[in-house]
């Protein structure tokens, strides 16, 4: 049993193959890569991250998940299914870095083959990330109370993939036989400036149990 490693970056969704029994799964990256590398105009007024309003609501009736996000970001509801994973949605900022990377967030839902504890899911996930990425460095791994209501786990790590130096923050939680995973990815040099938007967004998350 392997957990997910879903990450969005220069070629977003660099997803490692996962194995349930003897079946390996490697989701396609094509549509996500095209979206994240689409040229956009840089923010001409240099709006501060603190001033970006979370003025729209993403809601998935099928997965019982909601989250606020900025109307200034692009949202793509992809519903890309590759059992046991479903890429539910992704959010991309309108500001593009000189390296061609747009900071981005995705939500992936994983159907679990059996009940798992948060600790078991976390252990498998970190091991899988370490095996998959080049120059992987785990900076933070901690249990948190997500949106003040849900037991969850957060990891922060740096890695190199497809030649880009990236920083990632992932938050996951277990609800029944499903795992919900939110991933924020950005270039290493821009991450600290932009991660606050992600942290504000996850504070608005609700998941129907």
Image (cartoon, rainbow, N blue to C red):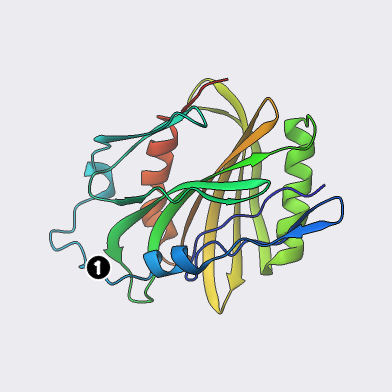
Residue 13: x and y in percent read 54, 61
| Label 1 environment density (alpha carbons within 10 Å; few <14, some 14–19, many ≥20) | some
Q: Tell me which residue sits at (41%, 44%) in the image.
A: 198
Write down the residue under mark 1.
40
Q: Nearer the viewer, residue 159 or 189?
A: 159
Q: Which image quadrant: the C terminus?
A: top right
When the figure is inspected, residue 150 is found, relative to residue 127, above or below; the finding is above
Residue 181: x and y in percent read 58, 42
In the image as oriented, which residue stretches furthest toward the bottom?
Answer: 163
Q: Nearer the viewer, residue 155 or 140?
A: 155
Q: Secondary structure at mark 1?
A: loop
Question: For this view, does 26 lie left or right of residue 150?
Answer: right
Q: Tell me which residue sits at (19%, 53%) in the image.
A: 47
Where on the picture, by quarter, is residue 172? Answer: top right
**Total label count?**
1
In the image as oriented, which residue stretches furthest toward the right?
Answer: 22
Q: Nearer the viewer, residue 76 or 37?
A: 76
Where on the picture, by quarter, is residue 191? Answer: bottom left
Question: For this view, does 44 lie left or right of residue 189?
Answer: left
Residue 140: x and y in percent read 63, 48
When the figure is inspected, residue 119 is found, relative to residue 126, above or below; the finding is above
Residue 66: x and y in percent read 42, 30
Q: Tell me which residue sits at (28%, 51%) in the image.
A: 73
When the figure is inspected, residue 74 is found, relative to residue 115, above or below; the finding is below
Q: Tell me which residue sits at (39%, 65%) in the image.
A: 36
């Amino acid at each position: 049993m392997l957990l997910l490693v879903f990450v969005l970056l220069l070629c977003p969704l660099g997803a490692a193959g996962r194995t349930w029994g003897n079946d390996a799964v490697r989701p396609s990256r094509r549509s996500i890569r095209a979206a994240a590398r689409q040229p956009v105009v840089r923010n001409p007024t240099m709006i501060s991250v603190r001033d970006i309003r979370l003025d729209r609501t993403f809601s998935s009736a099928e997965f019982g998940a909601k989250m606020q996000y900025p109307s200034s970001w692009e949202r793509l509801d992809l519903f890309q299914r590759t059992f046991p994973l479903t890429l539910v949605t992704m959010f991309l900022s309108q500001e593009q870095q000189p390296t061609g990377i747009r900071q981005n967030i995705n939500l992936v839902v994983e159907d679990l083959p059996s009940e798992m504890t948060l600790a078991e899911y976390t252990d498998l996930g970190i091991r899988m990330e370490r095996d998959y990425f080049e120059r992987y460095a785990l900076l933070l791994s901690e249990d948190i109370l997500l949106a003040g209501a849900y037991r969850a786990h957060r990891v922060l790590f740096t890695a190199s993939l497809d030649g880009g130096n990236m920083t990632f923050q992932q938050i996951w939680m277990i609800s029944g036989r499903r795992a919900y995973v939110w991933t924020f990815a950005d270039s290493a040099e821009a991450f600290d400036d932009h991660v606050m938007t992600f942290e504000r967004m996850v504070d608005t998350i609700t998941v129907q149990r």
